[in-house]
Amino acid sequence: MTSTASRDDPFMAFRFGVSFDSLPVAGFSEVSGIGVNVDYEQKKQGGQEIEQRFSGQVKYSNLILKRGIADRRILDWFWRFSLPSTSTQLLKSSTLSVFVRDPAGENIEMALQFLKVRPVSWSGPDLNAIGNNVALESLTLSHEGFVWLTT
């Protein structure tokens, strides 16, 4: 992974990869929803008229991954987490990594690791006999935080 300390130009967002801890690298065409929000509470302290802001709950956006359907691995993974056969299966989670490569595709310039990832929804392709579009699947995932991996 290249160092970002002296970098002046932004990362390019078109050459990236996705990997699950239980699946090999998957060829997704789109990853969206990377984000975090912090709620703030305003409270008056000690009878003063001045309100202070305190950070509250941290909320992570759901990730949405899209890819052309080439096999059933993603749907099988979704079912494995979503249909509990035992009570312990409800507690299962996965780790997801998204890595951005340089324009030549040689070096990883940015890598994010999402923790305690669980499936929220899966949707299949819109089918239309008139068009010639690629059959896409969409996977929505919740997570409990992420870290930016650096070297």
Image (cartoon, grey):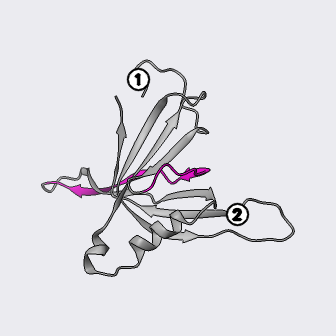
Q: Position of residue 47 (x, y in %)?
A: 15, 57
Q: Magenta span has 25?
A: yes
Range of residues picked out in magenta? 23-45
Of 84 and 30, which appears nearest the observer?
84
Left or right: where does residue 127 sit relative to residue 79? Answer: right
Tell me if mark 2 has few (under 14), some (14-19) or many (20+) residues whose alpha carbon lies within 10 angstroms of its own: some
Q: Position of residue 57 (x, y in %)?
A: 29, 58
Left or right: where does residue 13 sit relative to residue 86? Answer: right
Residue shown at the point (44%, 67%) measured from the top left: 119
Q: Which residue is mark 2?
A: 135
Give amino acid for label 1. Answer: Ser
Quarter of the image for the C terminus: give it: top left
Label 2's element? loop
Answer whether labels 1 and 2 touch (C-beta < 8 Å). Answer: no
Marks 1 and 2, how far apart at CA:
37 Å
Residue 126 lies in quadrant? bottom right
Front tag of 1 and 2: 2
Q: Position of residue 135 (x, y in %)?
A: 70, 63
Total tally of numbered discs in the picture: 2
Residue shown at the point (38%, 53%) measured from the top left: 21
Q: Which residue is mark 1?
A: 3
Quarter of the image for the N terminus: give it: top left
Residue shown at the point (31%, 74%) measured from the top left: 90
Of 145 and 36, which appears nearest the observer?
145
Q: Residue furthest left?
A: 46
User: Mark 1 or mark 2, which has the lower sequence index?
Assistant: 1
Tell me if mark 1 has few (under 14), some (14-19) or many (20+) residues whose alpha carbon lies within 10 angstroms of its own: few
Give amino acid for label 2. Answer: Ala
Residue 129 lies in quadrant? bottom right
